[in-house]
Structure formats: C-alpha cells, structure tokens
Image (cartoon, rainbow, N blue to C red):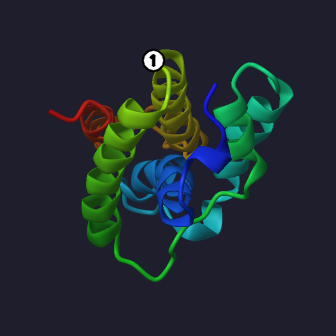
Amino acid sequence: MTAKADFSDEEWELLCEGPATAGVVALTACAGGSLGESWPLERPYAEARKEHGESELLDALVAEPPAVRPSESPEEVERRALGRLSEAVRLLEQKATRGEVHGYKRFTLDVAANVAEAHREEIASVTPAERAAIEKIAASLHPA
C-alpha cells in the first residue's frame, strides 16, 4: 500500500489538487458555473471518507479539504488542471499500485461528474459542455 509519506510535499500537493480541480473544470465548463457553487466538491469527498479503509492513499487524499484556486479563469483552470492530472497519474504509476492508480482516476472522475450533475440545467442534468469537460478530464487521466 502506498501512503502519503511516500510522496514529497510537492508531489502530495499535486495529487490532492487533481480531483478538486477536475470538479472545477466541470463546474466552469458551462456558462453560469461559478466557484460560489463549489459545494458539490464536498459530496464525493464525504462519500469517499465513508469507504475508509479501502485504500490508504485515497483515505489520506480525501482527508484533506478540496483545494481550488478561484482567481483563475475557466480556461486557465482547464489548461492547468488537465496537464497536472496527467502529471499526477504518471507519478502514481511510478509509486502506487495499479489499484490505487485506478482508484485515483475513478475518484477524480466521480468528483467531476458529481459537480456537473449538481449544476443542473433546464434541458439536461449534464450539459454537452460539461460532458465534453469530463471527456477531457478522462483523457488527461490516461497520459501517453
């Protein structure tokens, strides 16, 4: 099992940033989404805390509050987030087990989907822009 102690402070920050930033990318993908609505980020973290013990790595990750940078534009958030997510996955592939890497990817996508679904539009629960953002997030979680 991989633990927080297996990572430098900088590496741990990178890992912690990923899921929350993915949620912000989904939130801001559709006009009208704002960081004032960031409460949906908390729900998947709370749900993951209930599954405590499944993964030491994920337990440590969700114990930290979601970190977001509200001063960035949606374009800046997306550009930085997608690159950092790929970097985080590459780091995990070097240091973590396959199951832990899969758990990180699944949790990151769960956060993005939860945020997109919470930001309901009249037409659909997840807009095409939010769906496209989630697809970009998924692609960044599988770096070449």
Give the x, y percent position of residue 49: 81, 34
Quadrant position of residue 133 = top left
- Of 67 and 59, nearer the camera is 59
Give the x, y percent position of residue 27: 47, 54
Residue located at (62% from left, 69% from top): 36
Q: Amino acid at mark 1?
A: Arg
Q: Is residue 8 left or right of residue 66?
A: left
Is residue 100 shown above or below 133?
A: above
Task: Give the residue pinned by disc 1.
Answer: 98
Can residue 83 be seen here? The reply is yes
Give the x, y percent position of residue 47: 77, 31
Q: The N terminus appears in which quarter of the rendering?
A: top right
Residue located at (44% from left, 49% from top): 22
Quadrant position of residue 111 = top right
Q: Residue furthest bottom?
A: 71
- Of 100 and 95, nearer the camera is 95
Give the x, y percent position of residue 91: 38, 43
Callout 1 crowding tier (Cα within 10 Å): few <14, some 14–19, many ≥20: few
- Of 43 and 144, nearer the camera is 144
Q: Is residue 35 left or right of residue 29?
A: right
Tag count in the figure?
1
Quadrant position of residue 48 = top right
Q: The C terminus appears in which quarter of the rendering?
A: top left
Can residue 126 be seen here? The reply is no
> SS for tag 1?
helix
Q: Residue furthest left?
A: 144
Residue located at (58% from left, 36% from top): 114
Is residue 133 shown above or below 71?
A: above
Residue located at (51% from left, 57% from top): 17
